[in-house]
Image (cartoon, rainbow, N blue to C red):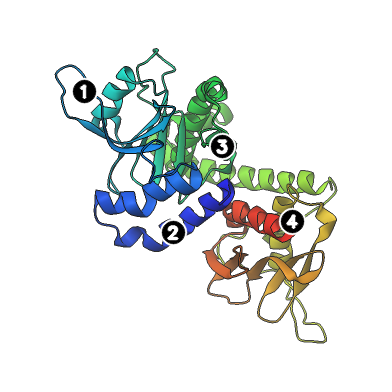
Amino acid sequence: MSFEAGINSLVKKMKGQQDIIQTEEATKNAFIMPFISQVLGYDVFNPLEVMPEFTADHGTKKGEKVDYAIMQDGEVRILIECKKIGDELNVKHASQLFRYFSVTNARIAILTNGRVFHFFTDLESPNIMDKRPFLVLDLLDVDETILPELKKITKETFDLDSIISSAEELKYVGALKRELTSMFKELPPEFVKLLMTSVSDKRATADNLALFKDLVDKALKQFLKEQVNDRLKTALGDTDMSFPESAVEPTTSTAETDSTPQPDEKGIITTEEELAGYQIVKAIACSEVKPQRIVHRDAKSYFAILLDNNNRKQIARLHFNAKSQWYVGTFDADKKETRHPITELEEIYTHADTIRATIRNLES
């Protein structure tokens, strides 16, 4: 199984099974061992590669164990400490990792609850595990920008020097992205005040701050949508391309347009939202194939996006005909479709990895 297929398989499994997992051991069996095997590429049944319940006595701490040690040539390469799915990943609860990091040759440590994986190294002090991870993988919210770095940790392409050299940038860029995500969910009063005082002479009263909080929130959303639009233009090589208002600003799946599209002679109606969704899929696909190879074909029940105008090479489907709910359909290696509910067109980007994997499967 390839690295990309391993990630996709584990994401699918996480979505289907996370609610039935109740214990740490079940978490290990369902998610963590498959991660070690399918994603990192190590043989979990070979103790020369993966040693469960690894013990390395240290000082007065005798008999303590770390859940897994990944080995190479008899030396510890990676340490893994496991928690039950849903548990908070706090380094205060990973004392074994800190101790074992200092007494083994490991330079990589992983703290995980099966869904979220925190990767640590020793950037701040040699042989002392950092308190902040340099890379965070969430299987229910995969950041595709970190996947090339994660691949460096796999058995096939393990490159410690490259991992360490890029770890500091990954650590702080990742932390900043998480802070920005948190900030966008709940705007900090200091941030609102800073922007308000830069564009207005109003006093920073509670009423004025409340007013500007809504204005800042609206401005940020419009700014991000404009950035998405610009990304599409650049990806498609069309700087003059413009999108209808509904392509960049729908807020719910029941968004209405000013004009009603007319059906063709077969009774098929192609909407502006479907065409905008097609442009997003096309932009995603540009990383794998030339954009002119991506075409669309509308039907009464769905809007198909195809490779080479071949109905047997379906990349994705848009199910936008129902007023109550939109769906984007993606395909696995067996060409089985999975429908994912969305409320905004931009959510198609969350399935970018699957769309690209589908194209690679079709090409192979």
Which sits earlier in the primary sequence, circle 4 or circle 3? 3
CB under 8 Å between discs 4 and 2: no
Question: What residue is disc 1 on?
Answer: 57
Q: Secondary structure at mark 3?
A: loop
Rendered view: 61 above or below 148: above
Which sits earlier in the primary sequence, circle 1 or circle 2? 2
Q: CA distance from mark 3 to mark 1?
A: 30 Å
**Quarter of the picture holding the C terminus:** bottom right
Question: What residue is disc 3 on?
Answer: 156
Query: How many residues crowd mark 2 within 10 Å: few (<14), some (14–19), many (20+)?
Result: some
> Of all residues shown, which one is farthest toward the top?
126
Rendered view: 138 above or below 306: above
Q: CA distance from mark 4 to mark 3?
A: 31 Å
Between label 1 and label 2, give the one nearer the viewer: 1
> Of all residues shown, which one is farthest toward the bottom?
266
Amino acid beneath label 3? Glu
Residue 57, horizontal then vertical, whole percent: 21, 23
Amino acid beneath label 2? Lys
Residue 90, horizontal then vertical, whole percent: 29, 34
Q: CA distance from mark 4 to mark 2?
A: 27 Å
Question: What residue is disc 4 on?
Answer: 282
Question: What residue is disc 2 on?
Answer: 13
Q: Secondary structure at mark 2?
A: helix
Q: CA distance from mark 4 to mark 1?
A: 55 Å
User: Do we see residue 317 in this rendering?
Assistant: yes
Out of 168 and 182, give the one closest to the viewer.
168
Q: Residue at x 82, y 59 (%)?
A: 293
